[in-house]
């Protein structure tokens, strides 16, 4: 691999950084809302699963 001078390196870094496509404000807001909704749904799901498993374990312990 050929070595580059520091000037060439920084020019390459700047060229690559210019290729980055940043999301629009609308895309960012939409994604944030979606993440918030999914977080609530999944937290409720795991609360339900944990409650069911807790109830099953408590019931099994009463049999002992």
Image (cartoon, grey):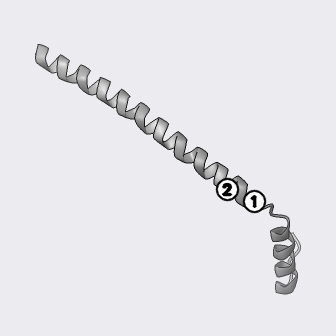
Please state the horizontal and vertical placement of residue 44, each as a whole percent of the image.
Answer: 41, 35
Name the residue located 82 percent from the left edge and 80 percent from the top edge.
Answer: 10
Q: Give the vertical position of 27 relative to 37 (above or below).
A: below
Name the residue located 42 percent from the left edge and 39 percent from the top edge.
Answer: 43
The answer to whether mark 2 and mark 1 are in CB contact below 8 A is yes
Q: Secondary structure at mark 2?
A: helix
Name the residue located 87 percent from the left edge and 79 percent from the top edge.
Answer: 11
Judge by depth and name the residue closer to the eye, 25 or 17: 25
Residue 24 is labelled as 1
Judge by depth and name the residue closer to the eye, 18 or 44: 44
Please state the horizontal and vertical placement of residue 15, each as a whole percent of the image.
Answer: 87, 72
Judge by depth and name the residue closer to the eye, 56 or 6: 56
Task: Name the side, left or right, on which 44 lies relative to 51.
Answer: right
Judge by depth and name the residue closer to the eye, 12 or 59: 59
Residue 48 is labelled as none
Task: Name the side, left or right, on which 57 lies relative to 46.
Answer: left
Please state the horizontal and vertical placement of residue 3, each as a whole percent of the image.
Answer: 86, 77
Which residue matches tag 2? 28
- In the picture, which quadrant includes the N terminus? bottom right
């Amino acid at each position: 691999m050929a070595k580059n001078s520091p000037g060439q390196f920084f020019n390459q870094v700047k060229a690559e950084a210019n290729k980055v496509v940043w999301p629009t404000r609308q895309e960012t807001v939409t994604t944030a809302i979606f993440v918030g909704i999914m977080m609530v749904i999944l937290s409720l799901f795991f609360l339900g699963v944990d409650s069911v498993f807790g109830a099953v374990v408590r019931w099994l312990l009463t049999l002992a």
